[in-house]
Image (cartoon, grey):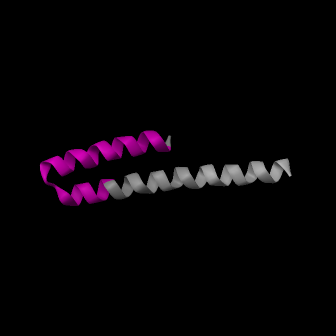
Amino acid sequence: MCPIISIIFAGLAYTFFQDGNMQGFYINIFITLFFISLMIRNILKEKRRRNEKNN
């Protein structure tokens, strides 16, 4: 779900950037980066859990 939401907000950010609406651009870029960071955090957490399970 996080990659889909990130792609949508990145597209919105690009649209706002093309229109010159920098406030909308910054808000959408922040949301995009937030969801990407959640996804990365979840991947790292799952890797740690699997490593602990195997040991």
Q: Position of residue 44 (x, y in %)?
A: 63, 53
Q: Main secondary structure of the magenta part?
A: helix
- Left or right side of 21 for 28: right
Residue at point 13% right, 48% down? 19
Is 26 one of the magenta-colored residues? yes
Is 32 one of the magenta-colored residues? no
Q: Position of residue 45 (x, y in %)?
A: 66, 54
Q: Is residue 11 above or below residue 32?
A: above
Residue at point 33% right, 55% down? 29
Residue at the far right in the pictured view: 55
24 vs 49, nearest the viewer: 49
Residue at the far left in the pictured view: 20
Q: Is residue 20 above or below residue 7?
A: below
- Left or right side of 27 for 43: right
Total tally of numbered discs in the picture:
0
Q: Position of residue 26 (x, y in %)?
A: 27, 59
Q: Position of residue 6 (x, y in %)?
A: 41, 45
Q: Quadrant of residue 24?
A: bottom left
The part of the chain drawn in magenta is: 2-28
Residue at point 50% right, 40% down? 1
